Amino acid sequence: MKSLASDNNAGVHPEIWPVIQAASQGASLSYGHDVWTEQMQATFEKAFGSQSQTFAVLTGTAANVLGLAAVLEPHQAVICSQMAHLNLDEGGAPERFLGAKLITLPTPDGKLCLDDVLAQIPAAEDEHRVQPRVVSITQPTELGTLYTLAEIRALAEALHERGLLLHMDGARIANAVVALDTGFYDMVTATGVDILSFGATKNGLLCGEAVVFLKPELARRFHFVRKQGMQLFSKMRLIAAQLTTYLDSGLWRRNALHANQMAAYLAAGLQPLPELKLYAPVQSNGVFVTLPAALIQALQAHTAFYTWDVLPGMPVNLVRWMTAFDTQKEDLDDFLAQLHAALEQWRNTP
C-alpha cells in the first residue's frame, strides 16, 4: 500500500537515526540541561535571530496549544480559520487546556483576510465580549496555499497596532520557506510573527517540534507551561539533537523541496484529465482535487488518501493527496496509471 494520505505517514529520514544514536551515548543531565539543547537554541537563533527563544516539545498539538497558553488569559480568544488545524484537528485540546474561545472565520482559500480579522476586534474593552488576543495563521494553510511575506507583514502590523499577537502554525514550515524561496528569518522574524509552532516531524524527524518565541518577554512563563502541559521530556537531548541536525545540515530544505516537487509533478499529471478539478492552487506539498465518487474507492484500494470535505459548503468528493520527502516519481507514475485506468472504466460505464 502506497500513501498520499499524509506526510506524517512517511518514516524517519535515514540521516536522523545516527543522530539519535549518537546523542543517546553515555549519561547527560536531563530535562534540557544538556549540551544538545544548548546547541539547538544556538541553531534556532541563527535561523530566527538572537532574540528568539526556542523550546522543544514532542507533538505539533503541544506546540500549538502550549505556545498559545503562554500568552493567553482566560477571558481572551484566538482568531483562526474555520479549517485551521487548531480548530478541526486538535481534538478540542485548545478549548480544554487554554480555557479560551476560538473565533473561527471562513477562508475559501485557507487564508485569513485582514479585513475579516479586524472586524472581529472590538473597538473598546467590553466585559460582555471575549477579547481577541492572538490571531493564528497556518503556513502553508490546510489547503496547501501560502501567505506571501507582504500579507504576513501587513497582518502583523495591523495586529500590533491594536495590541494583539500573531501566531504561526508552521507544521509544514519548511515547505513554505522553500516554496517562497526565502529563509526562516525573512518569513517569520522580519514579518513580525510573535510565536511560531515549528514542525519537523512531517518532514523526516522521529519526533521534533518546537515553540519559538520571537520576543523574549513572551517566553517568560513557558518553562512552567511546558511542564504543566506534560511536554518537559526527560531525555530532551534526543529531540534537540534531531532539530539541530535538521537545520544545520540543510535536511529541512532538501526534504521539503523534494516533497513540493513531487506535488507539482502529480498536479502536472492531472492536467490532461478534465473530469478532475484542482480545488486550490498547488503551492506546497498538497494537491486538493474533486473527482467522480466512483473513482475514490477504486483508487483507495491501492493508495491511501483522505476525502477532505471537512466543512459545510466544501465540495463533495474533494480529496487530499499529500507528498512527502520519500515520495518517488515511480510511485506517482503508478498512481496516475491507476487513475487513468479507473477514469477510463468510469467513462465507459453506462
Image (cartoon, grey):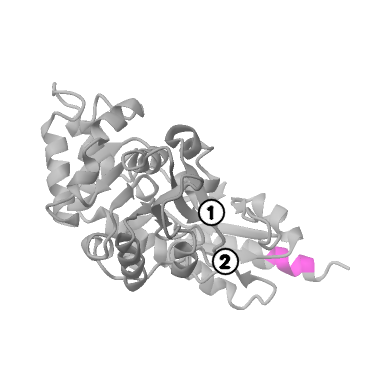
Query: In the image, what residue occupies the spot 26% across and 61% down?
Result: 192
Q: Is residue 83 visible in the rendered structure shown here?
A: no
The answer to which image quadrant residue 316 occupies is: bottom right
Give x and y (percent) for residue 300.
65, 51
Identify the element where label 2 is drawn.
loop
Residue 49 screen position, x and y as percent: 15, 56
Where does the magenta region start and end?
341-346
Q: Quadrant of the C terminus?
A: bottom right
Residue under the point 40% across and 64% down? 260
Q: Which of the labelled discs sits on residue 108, or is there none?
A: 2
Please identify the quarter of the rendering in which residue 271 is found. bottom right
Vertical order, 149 against 78 (above or below):
below
Task: Point out the residue furthest to the right here.
Answer: 350
Amino acid carrying mark 1 in the image? Thr
From the top left corner, tell me how far across and down residue 116 is, in percent.
50, 66
> Considering depth in this image, is 315 or 227 the residue closer to the camera?
227
